[in-house]
């Protein structure tokens, strides 16, 4: 599809502007949920709520943009002014992402998101309509039709590229000591928004600028309010066929007639928020789910927030398939005859996508860390002795523990006890060592929801020893980057200032210093550290620059590890990497079925829904149906906010949404069966059918 020389020059500026704005918005939205969780340290439930409040605001505020454009400043000035607000929000987001600045990042981020929501809300109802105003009708009716198609393609392309590039920029660059750089992740969309404003302003001399007229939305509200007031006053004395007929005395009959049609459409919009409550979870719950999965595909590491790009990619591919293949076939079979039928089937497809997400979540739950729950504890015992030992725990039964292995007593009920005992027995001849004391018993105070760790070793006089180290943290890193800590068991004072170096094949090097010169015998435990996944050469050296030990380890995505090192008689005697929480093992591509189904749902529900609302709405009140459509999306995000804290298990929440939308679509189908389609003027319906595609990317 090509833009030929007869196209108004202004159109090129508008299309370029929209590409940059969509790149900016979709790029920022893609990394937002992970920023809230990983950087601002909100829980996944809280991050989900904040994310959907932001999206909800983006779909409530277009009503304000439409009123400003139609009643006060006109579309050009509305787009320009709200774009500047948008850019201010982008800039504040960049500042909030700089940790070295002395500021409140949460407050700044919330203010930035508010400004971005105001900015994009002001743009949504204006840009497409402003582009359409540049054509001379009816002479350029065909060119206008092509414009809508090109505009729709531009929206998808801008969003598609933004959703690919922004996560890569965030992940590929390190800044301020972090493995990722959200400053660049938010800075790139900010630059694109600045470019969008410049391109738009440069085209001013080419634009056709129209003076604002009477605002349709305000007239709609006035007429509705007046009719309801008159009905309350006069209904006992005067009966009217329709409640809007009570406004006949003050408003034109054409407006009242058109409003009756619009209210019939808006009534069908009532069940729609349920669909959007499912659809918009791609940027929150589904992204968090992806972060719990193995993101390695054919040796390439996929960034979890990048999975969202699958939806617009599939939509671009599937729309021609549906338009040229599926829908013509359905017409031949006399099924899915109107947009309402397609919307109902699309809603069912969304339900299936959440069933897939729920089943996948059930599988993922088996890979999640086994963290001690309330009124329970776990005990972990690591045997570094050269022989097997017998472990007895007063809260559990006796077990055998092989040399170089570990054993975990998981989720033991605390009951009413305040402490527990642990006994360790070893043979007198333990490997090549003759123990002078082969038994040891320790008593430990119970700490609820904690995992205690004992390292079994022996000291310089060959007595068996039990060292209690810091409690294990089995929870995975919120970014999915492997977590590791070092436990160094010091049995003598012959090795000083131990340094542990992890060196990857790519040249990445992490060095950890364990200062031991003033340390009594026992365990030195490092804090947990996050190291990018990969194969590492581990070099252990002492203060005299000796390389006392070398070994290779593999750290996998999502894994939590403990590196246990024991020293005896001035030598590193035992080194082993223990897996505390298994790495993410379910491949991220298992999300493809749910993305495929939600993409089908978007095509059948979103595009068909806009086609219905635009073709059925009277020409004078199409702005009202646009506002109603956006508000249904906002209400859908509100539903997610309400449900976000109901379930402890995410799978149950997914299944609830699946059940709710199936019931919702049954109700919608029943409501749709009573709707009487109206035929409008050819000039309005033909053009608006194509315009319906413009808004599709916003969902």
Image (cartoon, rainbow, N blue to C red):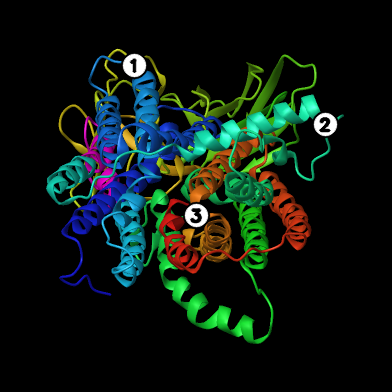
Dominant secondary structure, magenta: helix
| Gap in angstroms between the C-alphas marked 2 and 3 | 31 Å
* Residue 44 locus on image (x, y percent): 53, 35
Q: Are marks 2 and 3 in contact (CB under 8 Å)?
A: no
Looking at the picture, does residue 68 appear above or below residue 471? Answer: below
Rate crowding at label 3 as few (under 14), some (14 to 19) or many (20 or more) other CA atoms within 10 Å.
some
Segment tinted magenta in the rendering: 165-190
Q: Nearer the viewer, residue 643 or 247?
A: 247
Q: Nearer the viewer, residue 372 or 115?
A: 115
SS for callout 3 = helix
| Gap in angstroms between the C-alphas marked 1 and 2 | 57 Å
Question: Which residue sits at x=70%, y=40%?
Answer: 244
544 within the magenta span: no
Say which mark, if any, is on residue 144: none
Q: Name the mark nearer the viewer: 1 or 2.
A: 2
Locate residue 32 relative to residue 285 in the image: left or right.
Answer: left
Looking at the picture, does residue 545 appear above or below residue 636? Answer: above
* Residue 116 locus on image (x, y percent): 35, 33
Regarding residue 521, the answer to whether it shows in the image is yes
* Residue 508 locus on image (x, y percent): 21, 45
Q: Name the mark nearer the viewer: 3 or 1.
A: 3
| Gap in angstroms between the C-alphas marked 3 and 1 | 48 Å
Image quadrant occupied by the N terminus: bottom left
Mark 1 or mark 2, earlier in chain: 1
SS for callout 2 = loop
Q: Which residue is mark 2?
A: 235
* Residue 593 locus on image (x, y percent): 56, 65
- How many marks on residues? 3
Q: Which residue is mark 3?
A: 619
Question: Which residue sits at x=30%, y=34%?
Answer: 86
Q: Which residue is mark 1?
A: 104
């Amino acid at each position: 599809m090509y833009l030929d020389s007869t196209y108004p020059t202004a159109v090129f500026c508008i299309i370029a502007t929209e590409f940059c704005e969509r790149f900016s918005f979709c790029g920022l939205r893609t990394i937002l949920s992970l920023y809230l969780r990983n950087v601002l340290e909100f829980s996944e439930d809280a991050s989900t709520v904040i994310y959907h409040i932001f999206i909800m605001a983006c779909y409530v505020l277009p009503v304000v943009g439409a009123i400003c454009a139609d009643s006060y400043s006109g579309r050009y000035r509305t787009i320009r002014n709200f774009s500047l607000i948008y850019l201010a929000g982008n800039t504040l987001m960049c500042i909030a992402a700089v940790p070295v600045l002395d500021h409140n990042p949460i407050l700044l981020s919330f203010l930035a998101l508010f400004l971005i929501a105001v900015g994009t809300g002001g743009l949504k109802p204006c840009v497409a309509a402003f582009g359409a105003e540049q054509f001379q009708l009816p002479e350029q009716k065909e060119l206008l039709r092509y414009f809508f198609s090109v505009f729709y393609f531009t929206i998808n392309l801008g969003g598609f590229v933004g959703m690919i590039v922004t996560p890569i920029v965030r992940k590929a660059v390190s800044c301020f000591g972090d493995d990722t750089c959200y400053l660049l992740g938010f800075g790139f969309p900010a630059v694109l928004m600045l470019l969008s404003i410049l391109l738009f302003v440069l085209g001013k001399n080419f634009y056709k600028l129209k003076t604002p007229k009477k605002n349709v939305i305000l007239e709609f509200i006035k007429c509705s309010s007046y009719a309801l007031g008159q009905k309350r006053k006069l209904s006992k004395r005067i009966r009217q066929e329709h409640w809007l007929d009570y406004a006949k005395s003050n408003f034109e009959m054409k407006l009242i007639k058109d409003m009756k049609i619009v209210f019939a459409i808006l009534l069908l919009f009532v069940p729609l928020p349920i669909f959007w409550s499912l659809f918009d979870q791609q940027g929150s719950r589904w992204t968090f789910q992806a972060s719990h999965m193995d993101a390695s595909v054919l040796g390439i590491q996929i960034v979890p927030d990048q999975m969202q790009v699958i939806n617009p990619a599939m939509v671009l591919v599937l729309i021609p398939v549906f338009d040229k293949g599926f829908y013509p076939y359905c017409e031949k079979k006399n099924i899915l005859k109107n947009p309402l039928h397609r919307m109902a089937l699309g809603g069912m497809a969304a339900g299936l996508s959440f069933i897939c997400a729920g089943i996948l979540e059930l599988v993922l739950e088996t890979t999640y860390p086994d963290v001690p729950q309330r009124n329970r504890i776990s005990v972990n015992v690591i045997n570094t002795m050269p022989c097997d030992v017998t472990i007895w725990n007063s809260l559990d039964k006796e077990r055998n523990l092989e040399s170089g292995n570990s054993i975990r007593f998981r989720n033991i009920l605390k009951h009413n006890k305040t402490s527990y005992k642990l006994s360790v027995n070893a043979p007198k001849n333990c490997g090549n060592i003759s123990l002078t004391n082969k038994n040891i018993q320790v008593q430990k105070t119970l700490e609820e929801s904690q995992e205690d760790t004992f390292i079994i070793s022996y000291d310089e006089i060959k007595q068996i020893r039990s060292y209690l180290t810091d409690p294990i943290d089995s929870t995975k890193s919120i970014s999915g980057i492997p977590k590791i800590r070092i436990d160094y068991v010091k049995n003598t004072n012959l090795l000083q200032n131990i340094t542990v170096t992890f060196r990857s094949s790519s040249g990445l090097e992490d060095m950890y210093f364990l200062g031991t010169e003033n340390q009594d015998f026992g365990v030195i435990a490092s804090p947990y550290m996050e190291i990018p996944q990969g194969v590492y050469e581990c070099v252990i050296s002492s203060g005299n620059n000796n390389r006392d030990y070398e070994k290779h380890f593999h750290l996998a995505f999502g894994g939590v590890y403990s590196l246990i090192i024991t020293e005896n008689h001035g030598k590193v005697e035992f080194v082993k990497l223990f897996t505390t929480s298994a790495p993410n093992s379910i491949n991220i591509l298992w999300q493809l079925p749910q993305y495929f189904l939600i993409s089908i749902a978007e095509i059948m529900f979103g595009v068909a829904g806009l086609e219905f609302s635009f073709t059925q709405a009277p020409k004078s009140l199409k702005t009202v149906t646009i506002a109603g459509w956006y508000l249904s999306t906002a209400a859908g995000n509100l539903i997610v906010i309400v449900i976000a804290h109901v379930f402890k298990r995410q799978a149950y929440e997914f299944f609830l949404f699946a059940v709710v939308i199936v019931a919702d679509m049954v109700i919608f189908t029943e409501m749709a069966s009573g709707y009487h389609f109206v035929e409008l003027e050819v000039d309005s319906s033909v053009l608006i059918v194509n315009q319906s595609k413009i808004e599709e990317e916003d969902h």
